[in-house]
Amino acid sequence: MDLQKEFWIKNMVCSRCLKVITQELEEMGITVLSLELGKLLVESSKNTNTEVTYKVTKVLHSNDFDIVQSEGEMLVERIKIILIEQLDELPLTLKVKTSEHLSSTLHRDYKALSKLFSSKEKTTIEKYFIKLKIEKVKELIQLKQHSFSDIGYLLDYSSVNHLSRQFKDVVGMSMSDYKNTEKWKRNFYDEII
């Protein structure tokens, strides 16, 4: 009988490792039924429950990921993934407030989600989302295809001045200085917190 097991993965917020993890697990005799950001479903007919957990943990650790151990950690990872996915398609059009979107998607009260996120990550959801957006701004500056006004529009800022102030607060330099240095330092999404 095939054993199916689901894992939630901490800090898997980028798609760059999905292929490697799938390949490494399949080399160990574990079939990956689905792997998306933060969530893994595997199946094995040759391994016991303990062996599957051991092998999955080994592969994840070798790729700098951990298995989520609690429901609270799972919710925090889901919050991160939801926010990152919002930045996948530009222009960013926030039809509802981020708080309402998270609350309706996760079927939880936003105040409870916010408190949980802050206690686990030592920052607020809002500050985390701002940092994500600023990393996207850095990417768009490096592509050299958009003006600062266009970037502000693409990321749903009310004005380029608002974007400029936020960028300087997070990065410590103006967007112009960042663009002109060309010694660009960007962070992977899983390194933001």
Image (cartoon, helix red, strand yellow):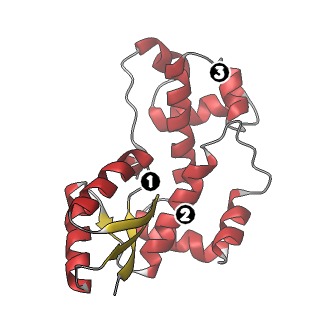
Q: Is residue 126 something that shows in the picture? A: no
Residue 140, percent from left and from top:
56, 26
The amino acid sitting under disc 3 is Phe
Mark 3 → mark 2, Cα distance in angstroms:
28 Å
Left or right: 165 as drawn, with respect to 81:
right
| Residue indicated by mark 2 | 79
Query: Which residue is identified by label 3?
Result: 148
Instruction: Report the Cα–Cα distance between label 1 and label 3.
Output: 26 Å
> Pointer 1: what residue?
13
Mark 3 vs 2, N-terminal side? 2
Secondary structure beneath label 1: loop
The x, y position of residue 52, in whole percent, is 25, 77
Q: Residue at x 42, y 73 (%)?
A: 73
- Is 158 on the left or on the right of 117, as rendered? right
Instruction: Please report whichever mark, 2 or 1, sits nearer to the chain's N-terminal start.
Output: 1
Residue at the right extreme? Answer: 95
Which three-letter amino acid code belongs to the residue tagged 2? Answer: Ile
Residue found at x 40% / y 15% = 182
